[in-house]
Amino acid sequence: MRSVFGGPYRQAIRSRSLAQSMLRKLSIPGPALTAALLLSAFAGRAEALGGLILIDKPPAQDYSLSIGPGVAGYPESPGSSHTKVVPIPGVDFYWSLGAFASTDIGLGWNFSHREDLQFGVRLWPVFGRGDERSQQLALSDVGTRLGKGLFLNYAPLRFLILQSSVLAGSAYKGDGVQVEAGATVGAPIGGRALLGVTLGGTWANGPYLRSYYGVTPEESAVGGLPVYTPGAGWSDVNLQLVGEMQISERWKLSGQLVGAHLVGDAGRSPVVQSRNQTTFSLTLWYQLK
């Protein structure tokens, strides 16, 4: 994960491995290649972290690569009151032509080389629903999907970034769509620490909300929850804190904490145990290049 600052910001997230052929061309050492390919499978553990992204301007030459151990926590399923905590090895990879691969922001391409503007495409896994409580309530499993997204960020001021993203491909049939917008402000604290705050909101279409928050007549008959058919609309408002501490020339500690409050039809769903959803991550980074 990167910081949200530095020219105009140095970002709130780092990046990871790309395809094997690309890594070969870039002559990345064998251990780094192995780690990059392995860690790409862990990308996107926390759905709340998958909407708005912040990425650096591509490096002027070759690539940049950082790795490190991390831990992440996220709700067991949308609306759950239980948080699942898992170890997550971290990798951040940026290529000079704009490609990126990251356990924080997924796999994609930033088409802009400007410091105040980022736009592009990305792939991001959207994890499904299959936890024990959902099974006890006879709620249908929702499989893990590969989300296909677009992002657009603009920094009108050195301390402010306006962000937006669209992510499609979730829900039962892969026809779920989420649209998120927000703004991040950030500033350095002393000579080694950075802090950023993001305020955002998420809109979701009907198939997405019905898949994760709806209850069909068949599910109601078996599990006992009332029939519920949500429609398209705002699903949450969220506040994110991002921080980074420079330990030495190559070592950094970074983390983020996201608090989302479910609203609208999502918040009123009988599936929901808690409207307040918390996601966090903490990573110790070592910069290889």
Image: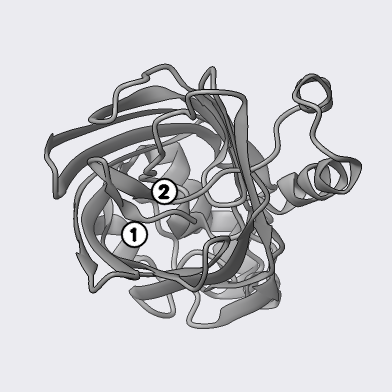
| Location of residue 40 (image quadrant) | top right
Q: Cβ–Cβ below 8 Å for labels 2 and 1?
A: yes
Q: Position of residue 232 (x, y in %)?
A: 30, 41
- Which residue is found at the position 35% from the left and 45% from the top? 52
For the question of whether residue 262 can be seen, the reply is: no
The residue labelled by disc 1 is 266
The residue labelled by disc 2 is 209
- Which residue is found at the position 70% from the left and 63% from the top? 130
Furthest toward the front, the residue is 249
Mark 1: secondary structure: helix
- Which residue is found at the position 62% from the left and 25% from the top? 62
Q: Position of residue 188 (x, y in %)?
A: 23, 64
At label 1, the amino acid type is Ala
Which part of the image, by quadrant, shows the C terminus?
A: top right
User: Who is closer to the viewer here, 151 or 90?
Assistant: 90
Left or right, 20 with respect to 78, comes to right
Left or right, 34 with respect to 173, comes to right
For the question of whether residue 7 can be seen, the reply is: yes
- Which residue is found at the position 40% from the left and 58% from the top? 228
Left or right, 196 with respect to 206, comes to left
